[in-house]
Image (cartoon, coloured by chain):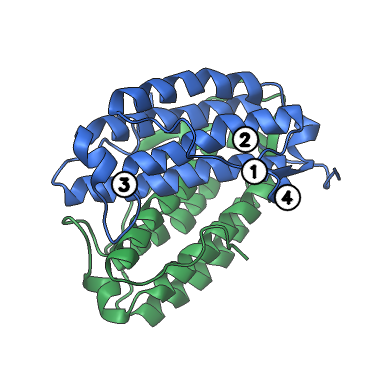
Chain colours: A green, B blue
Amino acid sequence: MTTTATATKQFISADQLLEHWQGHRNLTRRVIESFPEKELFEFSVGGMRPFAKLATELLSIAGPGLKGIVEGKMDAFDDETAAPKTKEELLAKWDSETEVINLYFNQISQERFQETFNLFGQYEFPVYQNILYFIDNEIHHRGQGYTYLRALGIVPPFFWERF
Amino acid sequence: MTTTATATKQFISADQLLEHWQGHRNLTRRVIESFPEKELFEFSVGGMRPFAKLATELLSIAGPGLKGIVEGKMDAFDDETAAPKTKEELLAKWDSETEVINLYFNQISQERFQETFNLFGQYEFPVYQNILYFIDNEIHHRGQGYTYLRALGIVPPFFWERF
């Protein structure tokens, strides 16, 4: 692990980033809820994955990724094992991961955010970039979910409503 | 303007955030380029706006928003005046805004990121939240653009390719 240049002018603190992320996760939860059960698992546009599959990917990244960073383990990414089979199961898993994310995120030090880590044994970047990737990837896939909802004639939740 | 609690554990520096944002902007530029001219301005899914309209919204937020923060001006948001009419015009505007963003972002101090500002005379939040909103909103709309491209049978650029 190498340490990159130490930051000077702070943009955001760790606490603020975590709150921001959990706000996004609240919104993604609302998007999951907005889908009818069948469409959540089956509907998509242009041959893409249904939203349940995208949400399961997100669950397989956030908690397990942070756990890997904290414990220094580079287990491969896995979104097949224990994939939720119903909307209820998916929402329950979403909620239980909230605490997992808080638990591990808070164990990462300011210095560690700047160290490189080989996430899932595959993505070698500074830890802060890995974590931004988790969040960005969620916003990206949720934007696709919004499009699915609109294509289904369902009004999605407000983008700015997070808490 | 009120100052919120001073941050302690740093997550990311201002320089790193700016680089991260410009990386996202490079990817959004590639998404604009991926659309055929006609579809860029006309195609959409589920009654949503075409991608040119979404990209124009992004242009009307980032540079003007930062300028407003730096100069303390709360002019209303405007994505109608001077909206690009061709793909070439849109890409040229995208490129010229890159420098505008760098110019104004770099004038914001660490303390200022924590102060609230009434963005566009309408959104009263800490400056760091306003800026994260600019980026998140770009990722959100670009995710919708990815769905449009897939619906058109066009393979979008890799999500992780930023520079």
The numbered mark, 4 or 3, whose residue comes first in the sequence reads 3
Are labels 2 and 1 assigned to the same chain?
A: yes
What's the amino acid at mark 1? Answer: Asn
In the picture as drawn, the residue positioned furthest to the right comes out as B2
**Is residue A73 visible from the viewing direction of this image?**
no
The quarter of the image holding the N terminus of chain B is top right
Label 2 CA crowd tier, 10 Å (few <14, some 14–19, many 20+): many
Q: Which residue is mark 1?
A: B130
- Residue B156's place in the image compared with B105, above or below, is below
In this picture, residue B109 sits left or right of residue A106: right
State the SS at label 4. Answer: strand
Q: Which residue is mark 3?
A: B50
State the SS at label 3. Answer: loop
Q: Nearer the viewer, mark 4 or mark 1?
A: 4
Find the distance from the CA under tag 2 to the CA under tag 1: 8 Å
Q: Residue B9, image x and y in percent?
A: 73, 41
- Residue A31's place in the image compared with B6, above or below, is below
The numbered mark, 2 or 4, whose residue comes first in the sequence reads 2
Identify the residue at image location x=22%, y=45%: B149
Is B58 or A84 nearer to us in this picture? B58
What's the amino acid at mark 4? Answer: Glu
Q: Which residue is mark 2?
A: B65
Quarter occupied by residue A50: bottom left
Tag 2 near tag 1, CB within 8 Å? yes
Q: Which residue is mark 4?
A: B124
